[in-house]
Amino acid sequence: YELLGTNLKFMDIKSNKVIVITSAIKGEGKTTVAVLHSKLEAARGKKILLIDCDRIRGSVHKHFDLVIEYGLLELVSGKKILEEILIKNIVKNLDVLPLKYVENEIKDVDFIEKIKIIIEKLKNSYDIIILDTAPLMVTLNTILLGQFSDGILFVVGYNMVSKKELKYSKLLMKNHKVNMYGIIINKIDNSEYIWGNLNRY
């Protein structure tokens, strides 16, 4: 993860304000990557906001051993205000906007537009905003957030995803003109991570 942070710094030092972290399918470890990268950047002294945008299987709060009653969906729907949802300094320099899955009637388009508004309001308060999103193969929400962000980090679980799924994910990002910083090969011996470029697939 030190290497990951260094690569981002050299790739786009002025505009890595909003980063989406996603994968092709569930279970590849994108949330773990998002949490660890957030902690790393916070430890470097940067002010970080981690937002759980996975409205299907939101689990960022579980990585911090938190039990939550409400989260981003209630903020988006207007049932709660930001101050009631935002968890400040969960570790030093790291704030979290969690999400708890609940049955709701919020349309995807409305969900994305409300998140954009929230991010624009908070941008000036943080050095980096990291979005943990649903997998690309599950919902177009991720692509829409990717278009709004400065770039996507794509997590690939080793021996977990097919070439067909990888090619489709790459095509999806290309067709929607999403900037991709690169990929992280995850779950190699449970601890080894490799920085790469999706073009090699």
Image: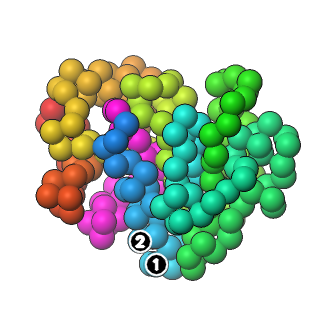
Q: Residue at x 72, y 29 (%)?
A: 104
Res. 44 image quadrant: bottom left
What SS does tag 2 mark?
helix
Q: Residue at x 69, y 46 (%)?
A: 72
User: For mark 1, what is the residue?
Assistant: 43
Q: In the drawing, does residue 70 fall left or right of residue 44?
A: right
Q: Quadrant of the N terminus?
A: bottom left
Q: At which x and y percent is residue 102?
A: 67, 37
Q: Is there any visible trace of residue 75 in the rendered image?
A: yes
Please, what is the three-letter code of the amino acid marked with disc 2? Leu
User: For mark 2, what is the residue?
Assistant: 40
Q: Residue at x 59, y 37 (%)?
A: 55
Q: Which residues are magenta?
A: 1-25
Whether residue 40 appears in magenta in the rendering, the answer is no
| Label 2: few (<14), some (14–19) or many (≥20) C-alpha neighbours in 10 Å | some
Res. 124 image quadrant: bottom right
Label disc, if present, on residue 92 of the rendered structure: none
The answer to whether marks 1 and 2 mark residues whose Cβ atoms lie closer than 8 Å is: yes
What SS does tag 1 mark?
helix
**Residue 1, relative to residue 169: is it above or below?**
below
Q: Is there any visible trace of residue 199 in the rendered image?
A: no
Separation of residues labelled 1 and 2 (CA atoms):
5 Å
